[in-house]
Image (cartoon, grey):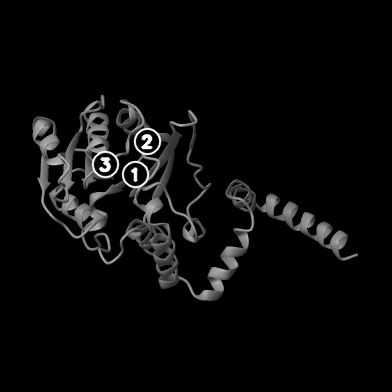
Amino acid sequence: MRYSIITVNYNNVEGLCRTIESVTSQTCRDFEFIVIDGGSTDGSAEVLKAYDKDIDYWVSEPDGGIYQAMNKGIAQAHGEYLNFMNSGDSFYDGQVLERLTASRLSADIIVGRDYHFDEATGQGFATLLPPRVTMLTFIHHSLPHQSSFFRRTLFADSPYDESLRLVADVKLYIQKICVEQRTVQLADIIVCRREKDGASVAHNDTRLSEHSRVVGEYLPKGAIEDYETLYLLDKSTMYKLMTLLHHSKGRRWLAYCIRIIHRLCCS
């Protein structure tokens, strides 16, 4: 079995229905579907009963939050790759898993793109992925978690940190990619249509505080300040700069431009 799709839900029955429909409509059937509900009281359990034949494992009982629920899902998973498509989010279309399988990617972590759509304006945009993943990726941002696929073996000795409410996924990325140097591949495939207002948006202050604390566990203050200098640029420009610096000719060209700018500004 190639994929385990894990959905975490709590009192979001409408979002749960959208997510289930998007999973069950996938043309690639090489997956199992696991739903962990936190003891919802809004009819979610009744929905799960109605879809029982389409879900390989589900449970509705109180838990300790998003990441404890994800860890419960991991414990039930058998697929080679795990994806966490939580309630309210959905696969972009019915061919996502088929396209991903056809791409023959084989890294420890495969990262696709999210699609953010605003029904009020009728406009949307896809996540901008970095040219390569480094610690810089996680100073203030992260990778699209709903559009990521993780080898199940990555969780054998390091499940999600349940002491964190909103950024245990950021900690997992840093630990696996930057510390353990596990392989990661970026796929130009839109995987997830994201719900506009998720838990991170509703509790943004908590998210920012936790994110800062997690980054501080891995980098000293001086290094963080150096990285933050680059965040004076917008994300698009910063990613273009990273691409430029990857090549020696680009580095020489940039150094020359900086010298010229410095002379003009200091003359």
Which quadrant holds residue 105? top left
**SS for tag 2?**
strand
Question: Where residue 87 is drawn, which disc sits there?
Answer: 3
**Residue 188 showing in the rendered view:** no
Residue found at x 43% / y 61%: 205
Using the image as rendered, state which of residue 48 and residue 249 is in the foreground. 48
Residue 33 lies, in percent from the top left, at: 18, 38
Q: Are marks 1 and 3 in contact (CB under 8 Å)?
A: no
Which residue is tagged 2? 191
* Residue at (49, 59) in percent of width and height: 140
* Quarter location, residue 217: bottom left
Of residue 41 and residue 158, the one placed in the foreground of this image is 41
Mark 1: amino acid: Gln
Image quadrant for the C terminus?
Answer: bottom right
Q: Are marks 2 and 3 in contact (CB under 8 Å)?
A: no
Rendering coords of residue 15 (x, y %): 27, 37
Q: Check whether the beta carbons of the residues at disc 1 and disc 2 lie within 8 A of each other.
A: yes
> Mark 1 = which residue?
146
Q: Quadrant of the N terminus?
A: top left
Label 1 crowd (10 A; few <14 / some 14-19 / many >=20): many
Callout 3, which amino acid? Ser
**Which numbered disc, 1 or 2, marks the residue that appears first in the sequence?**
1
* Of 107 and 204, the residue lying toward us: 204
Q: Amino acid at mark 2?
A: Val
Q: How far across and down, in percent of the image, does residue 114 sit?
A: 42, 39
Q: Secondary structure at mark 1?
A: helix
User: How far is the residue under mark 1 from the one under mark 3?
Assistant: 11 Å
| Image vertical order of residue 200 relative to residue 218, above or below | above
Q: Nearer the viewer, mark 2 or mark 3?
A: 3
Q: Is residue 157 left or right of residue 105?
A: left
Q: Earlier in the sequence, mark 2 or mark 3?
A: 3
Tell which circle, 1 or 3, labels the residue nearer the N-terminal end.
3
